[in-house]
Amino acid sequence: MPRTGRLTTAAAALAAISVLATACTGQSGTAAADDPKADVTLTFWHGWSAPAEVKAIEENIARFEKAHPNIKVKATGNMTDDKVNQALRAGGDKAPDVVSSFTTDSVGKFCNSGAFVDLNPFLTKSGVDKAKVFPKTLLGYTQFKGNQCTLPLLNDAYGLVYNKTAFAAAGITEAPRTWSEFTEVARKLTKPSGDSYEQVGLMPTFHGYETTPMRLAAQWSPTYFGPDGKSNLAGDPAFAKMLTAQKGLVADLGGYEKLEKFRAGFGDEWSAEHPFHRGQVAMQIDGEWRAAMAKEAGVPFEIGTAPLPVPDDQLADYGKGYVSGTIMGISAASRKQNAAWELVRYMTTDTAAVVAFSNAIHNVPSTLAALDSPDLRVTPEFKTFIDIARHPKSNTTPAQADGGTYQLTFQDFAYAVEKGAVPDIPAGLAATDRQIDTDIAKAQ
């Protein structure tokens, strides 16, 4: 089950991120002097709000408090990054000690501004070898320029969820593995109805929930920034190839205007009225939660899951995908950082805690040991996303000092491309690079 209120696109995520003050005060990771064995109460802010999810958090906290009887945790849910940033700027008693965020895009800001402490000293002090605990990609999106100011707390992997019954009716026996197969399958599954559709094989436009430019670009294994730190959208052919392929798929399925008109009638992404649940789309680019949600919605068809297809010339890399997840860090304003570290360490590195939380909210575990745990409940549908998370070529969008503003800039350009408003994609990508470089320079 997804995190209620989760931020599913760069645009939604950044709408909640206010600019952090660059002069955050408080102890650094190397200066924390509080006694972690003293009686203390920690304030912990997180974003979960659904009853089942809050219950899962509370159960994990209860297990932590049993193991650390001197530390009490006061948890507050449904906290957005906007609320967190306001409290961190205010400092003092108004700031939480520990924060969990859904927004990996904000890691660069959290680290660069000093709002969260660098956890490397705490990891060293505790003898935790992060490279042996966490998958490499997850470590990449939880740090910025060597500052490990957050750690992974569960993981999201993105793949393909599909209607196996519709596949069988169309004579399709397996999920597409390459982009050309994907296009052919999407065409076969599309059923026009007058000037609209009875069903589309896939909603390929970038406003289609999780079908963002970043999700698709991951299948081309892109490099967003060069060795010099400059934006690399025009320099890496992956971006132009992805945009051209997506634009072609939009055209093949009826064109942008027709598809967007159909999409306007879709239900809420997190409700039983989701178009995949209702049979309006036969394939959905989505995360590990979708299959479970569809079953809970009582869909009358069989569900299948698979990795997203790869470019035809990258078939050897089939199985990779875009990964992201929840992050956890310690406020620089906290005067209880050693105690706070005990909570962060427990929730992010304790195998039993990670597995229990994963089982409860149906997200992918964020440690190597938890991924291999015999206690992890794994359905065939869920295993697909575990495999994507473990794939060595799975990738994500890198942290930057501007948060995810560069992703918004790229996304806005992609919106223009799919509408047919960009006559020269390479030239447009070069202009987008210049805008991104300007924005990052301002943020540093």
Image: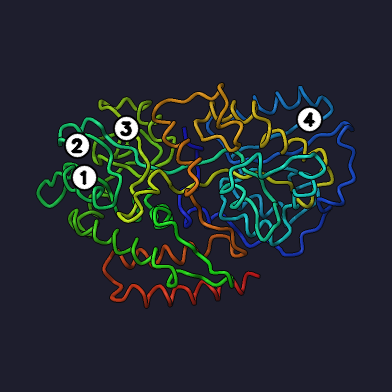
- Whether 35 is drawn above or below 105: the answer is above
Q: Which amino acid type is marked by label 3?
A: Gly
Q: Nearer the viewer, residue 277 or 282?
A: 282
Q: Is residue 64 left or right of residue 184?
A: right
Location of residue 301 with respect to 147 vertically, above or below:
above
Task: Point out the tag, 4 or 1, that comes first from the N-terminus.
Answer: 4
**Do callouts 2 and 1 mark residues in contact (Cβ within 8 Å)?**
yes
- Residue placed at 29% from the left, 60% from the top? 245
Marks 2 and 1, how far apart at CA: 8 Å
CA gap, disc 4 and disc 1 = 54 Å
| Label 4 CA crowd tier, 10 Å (few <14, some 14–19, many 20+) | some
Q: CA distance from mark 1 to mark 3?
A: 14 Å
Label 2 vs 1, first from the N-terminus: 2
Instruction: Assess disc 2: are there few (<14), some (14-19) or many (≥20) residues with their C-alpha within 10 Å of its C-alpha.
Output: some
| Residue 302: x %, y % from top left | 28, 27
Mark 2 or mark 4, which has the lower sequence index?
4
Count residues near mark 1 (Cα–Cα under 10 Å), then give few for <14, some for 14-19, many for 20+: many
31, 136: nearer the viewer: 136
Q: Which amino acid does the dot numbered 1 rest on?
A: Val
Label 2: which residue? 172
Residue depth check, mark 2 versus mark 3: number of the one nearer the observer:
2
Residue hosting label 3: 304
Where 168 sits versus 286, above or below? Answer: above
Q: Earlier in the sequence, mark 4 or mark 3?
A: 4
Which residue type does callout 4 highlight?
Answer: Lys
State which tag comes first along the sequence, 1 or 3. 1
Where residue 17 appears, as percent x and y from the top left, is 58, 57
Label 2 with label 3: CB-CB less than 8 Å: no
The residue pinned by badge 4 equals 72
Q: Which residue does the numbered mark 1 point to in the structure image?
A: 185
Q: Check the image and tell me how it is coloured.
A: rainbow
